[in-house]
Amino acid sequence: MTATKLVLIRHGQTDDNQRQVFQGHAGHGLNERGREQAARLAARLVHTRVHLDAIYASDLQRAHETASILGEALSLVPITDPSLREVNLGAWQGLSSREVETRYAEEYAAWQRGDDVRRGGGETYAELGARIVGAIDRIADLHRGGAAAVVSHGAAIKTFTALALGVPTGRMRQFQVPTNTAVCVFERRETGALRLVVWNDAAHLGDPLADALAAPLVRAAP
């Protein structure tokens, strides 16, 4: 049977993204730039005649709003799934990196080292991984041989990718958080084996290679 296509999409930009504030399960909807990003991706998917059987989304506002913009363009109603949420960051939510480093110095230092700590009393990456893998497995089972989009969050997509590639959670910080509205594509075989086909494709926002080489490297929050 043909491999199942899983199209993972990070939500559009929010004001908290722009201010580099930890969002987790909190945060708000898209800002003007985020809505524009989602509209650009929607236009790209329509123009390239991408076929999707369904769109699933985290129930957090920023992800659901992104999925709604895509769904309207593709004549699909997004299906919400709380299991696709971002990692719960507990007391870190709503704080900047500097504020977290000041208030939770030991936790922050452990996280910087790559330790899988329960940040702010929230979730570990292991717990996030179990949740996001379970959700995407269920979606893949429902669309065997087809294609489904999953609109989720930076750390959630990164954690799923790390587990799919066999990368330890302590080394996840070695690859960047996907760009807002960037697309990652996996193929899942009948055996359950996953193959990464596309990573962090944000060509609808400009030339990703030129942007990466022109801009200074910035350490992303999640």
Image: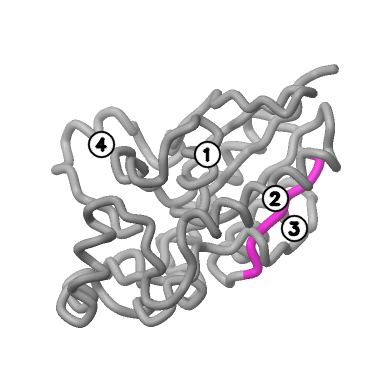
Q: Residues within 10 Å of mark 1 (few under 14, many from 20)?
A: some
The N terminus - image quarter: top right
Q: Please report whichever mark, 4 or 2, sits nearer to the chain's N-terminal start.
A: 2
- Who's the residue at 35% across and 57% down the image? 222
Q: Please report whichever mark, 3 or 4, sits nearer to the chain's N-terminal start.
A: 3
Rounded to the nearest angstrom, the CA distance separating label 1 from label 2 is 12 Å
Name the residue type under label 2: Gly
Nearer the observer, 125 or 195 = 125
Q: How far across and down, in percent of the image, does residue 181 sit?
A: 49, 49
State yes or no: residue 33 in magenta. Answer: no
Q: Residues within 10 Å of mark 4 (few under 14, many from 20)?
A: few
Q: Which residue is mark 2?
A: 134
Name the residue type under label 4: Asp
- Image height of 20 relative to 209, above or below: below
- Who's the residue at 77% across and 39% down the image? 140
Rounded to the nearest angstrom, the CA distance separating label 3 from label 1 is 26 Å
Here the colouring is: one colour
